[in-house]
Amino acid sequence: MNGPYLNRIDGIYDQKTLKQLLDYGVEHFSFDFRPRSFNFIPQYVFAQFLEQLNLTAALKIYMHFAGDSEFLVKKFLSDAKDSLALSPYRPPPELVLEFSDTQSASYYDHFELPYFWHLRPFMKFEDFLTGKNLQGVILSMSHLVELERKQRLEEFIAKFLQVKVQRPKLEVILSMDFAQELKQELVEYLDINIVSFSLDRSCEISYRRPNIPRIIEGLNKS
């Protein structure tokens, strides 16, 4: 972790990997509750993590949803808070929400927690600016590379920097995998706060079997 930014791991699904990355010093973890995701984690497994592992206030736990009802998101949040209450470790980590759908800002604000939103290049930026609990946005390296290929990256950066003027405290997460090259110029231009790496085929020995040495190597290079 060599840059002026933090690292995050996306799609944690097993306790062994989580413990090893905690020992390495990673403090930001995203858990994927989207049923069709390869990184889907059942709620009861997530609850075990919260109850059994030493997850302290230094950590930030992201709960990733898409297209779910308010009832379901609230239920998962309530269960997560109950699990943390059962943990012997204090103080607890921070829970934040993460969304990769296109609901209204009022939907996201309804949960009364900070949230991060996946911003895709051709969305209207104004759609997310009104969220009072919006803490940050998540940009995809794959989308940015595609914009560069289409010679529209500079246009996107200019528009995004205008957003940052309106919301100067907006945090920016850059999402990528371990096979992609981290472009330092993008980190600087977009004022990236966190570089987030996905658990996927680029760092797995086989399906849902993370290659921890490969992950640590990738974090060291970032």
Image (tube, rainbow, N blue to C red):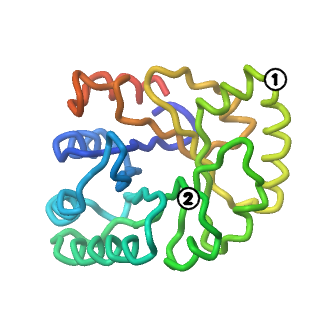
143 to the left or right of 199: right
Q: Residue at x 40, y 24 (%)?
A: 218
Q: Nearer the viewer, residue 136 or 222?
A: 136
Q: Is residue 92 left or right of residue 145?
A: left
Residue 68 is tagged as none
Q: Residue 151 shows which numbered tag?
A: 1
Q: Which residue in the structure is indicated by mark 2?
A: 116
Which residue sits at x=29%, y=71%?
Answer: 80
> Residue drawn 47% across and 57% down?
66
Q: Are marks 1 and 2 in contact (CB under 8 Å)?
A: no
**Residue 194 image-quadrant placement:** top right
Q: Where is residue 104 shown, x and y percent of the image?
A: 64, 69
| Label 2 neighbour load within 10 Å: few <14, some 14-19, many 20+ | many
Q: Say which amino acid is labelled 1.
A: Gln
**Considering only vertical position in the picture, is 92 above or below 148?**
below
Q: Is 107 rendered above or below residue 183?
A: below
Foreground label between 1 and 2: 1
Q: Label 2: state its secondary structure.
A: strand
> Splitting the image into 4 quarters, where does residue 9 fall?
top left
